[in-house]
Image: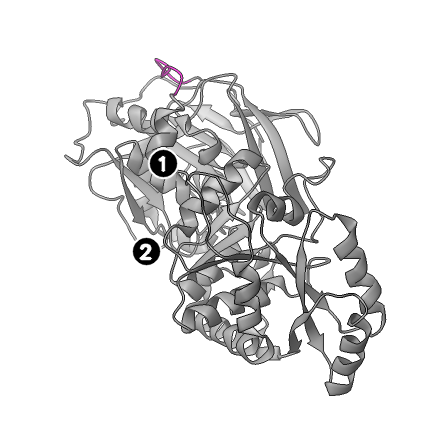
Amino acid sequence: MVTSVPRLVIAAPSSGSGKTTVATGLMAALTARGLTVSPHKVGPDYIDPGYHALATGRVGRNLDAYLCGPELVGPLFAHGARGCDIAVVEGVMGLYDGAAGEGELASTAHVAKLLRAPVVLVVDASSQSRSVAALVHGFVSWDPEVRVGGVILNKVASDRHEGLLREALDSVGVPVMGVLRRVARVETPSRHLGLVPVAERGSLAVEAVDAMAAQVAAGCDLSALVALARGAGPLADAAWDAGEALVSSPPPPLPSSSPGAPPPGPGSAVDGPRPQSPDGPVVAVAGGAAFTFSYAEHSELLAAAGAEAVVFDPLRDEELPEGTVGLVIGGGFPEVYAAELSANEPLRKAVAGLAASGAPVAAECAGLLYLCRELDGMPLCGVLDASARMSERLTLGYRDAVAVNDSVLAGAGTRMRGHEFHRTAVEPGAGAAPAWGVRAPERRVEGFVQRGVHASYLHTHWASEPGVARRFVERCRTS
């Protein structure tokens, strides 16, 4: 199957150049023109896809050659872009910045080559004039397999400044497809882990996206950008399909019992099977403002494995969804909402009871914190005998991991790649039965496996190992 969806990659020489403003604004401006736009983000970022979704009305999807492998970039792109008129892919960091120590792997340039997509370079021109030509020339010539088809100049001070920049770039041979002036109201607020997610900003996020769209529509040649996108080469990759992925990736056998499981105590909910939905086991998926980090493919894999994924909001809901037999708690910002999460005692007790029953619980990063006894002194679910706190240290980077113990997600010895991104610390960092052994940046074990709980700081992408979804759902059926 050949994919021929027109596509562009929005890249930059470095972070902070304006990629998100341009990519999100372009998505929204093209959508306003009546095009169905497929939004994508290079790398593991969860926040930018939220803005992309707001701009296009479609799910924002990640393309990560490290977490999923280069071979899945094309199929995952084709899956997300199916039926669309055009796709816009926002890059990560600088154009040629990839996974540390891995060359071009997972860089924007790497993904652009895998997608056979032209690149538009967003340049922060605020502190330069003629030097912009040398900068752009360097990025254009560095890798001849990367096709830089246009430049958008950002943060241009005046008409005179624009004239100097355009004159300098005439010698490079790359067309200027847009000039954007600095506009304060387009700025989106940030905090300790980047932009504030869409789910927390409500109407302010809508206003920000509208402002980005207006700026891009006024300052960029949309027709030229669409024409460039139409010049992307065809892709021979078949679109990824959750059901087919599960068939081709069967799970290892389920463990008879999970390590680290204390014997059931009086009153624990293990007297009999919990009622299940006739449509499949109900898996509660944490959402709302505190838990915004999730890859769309996770829910698709759960559904393909036969589960009914039901989203609930731990900030508002005092009960788990009716019939819940499994729980997935992804990433987010529980540290921002610790007081509210703590105040919702009925839900905390429901989560603790579900975990005590042996039901499957998969928790990543924010989910790990939520299962701890406390976060910065405020009581949380108490599923794990661990406490969490805010930290001055930013932990960030890709990780190679191996499952240390059998769990509801993976059999011991299963290798997966993950990503850490947090300013919190959990003490202890691992339970009696750790979840993962991590090779770099230092060798260590981390996370917790106890009874049906798998809790860890690592964000993983289940498309890279679809058997974890089938394994989790099968455990939901039998727990």
Q: For the C terminus, which image quadrant?
A: top left
Residue at position x 41%, y 55% in the image: 340
Residue at position x 49%, y 32% in the image: 464
Camera-side residue of 423 and 133: 133
- Residue 329, compared with residue 177, is above or below; it is above
Of badges 2 and 1, nearer the viewer stands 1
Q: What stretch is highlighted in magenta?
A: 251-258
Task: Say the numbered circle drawn on residue 439.
Answer: none
Residue at position x 58%, y 52% in the image: 117
Residue wearing tag 2? 316
Q: What residue type is labelled 2?
A: Arg
Q: Which amino acid does label 1 sit on?
A: Ala
Residue 209 falls within the magenta-colored stretch: no
Q: Going from the N terminus, do you reach mark 2 or mark 1 first?
A: 1
- Mark 2 nearby-residue class (10 Å; few <14, some 14–19, many ≥20): few
- Residue 376, compared with residue 34, is above or below; it is above
Q: Main secondary structure of the magenta part?
A: loop
Residue at position x 46%, y 69% in the image: 30
Residue 411: where, in percent of width, then height? 45, 18
Camera-side residue of 443 and 57: 57
Q: Quadrant of residue 297?
A: top left
Residue wearing tag 1? 242
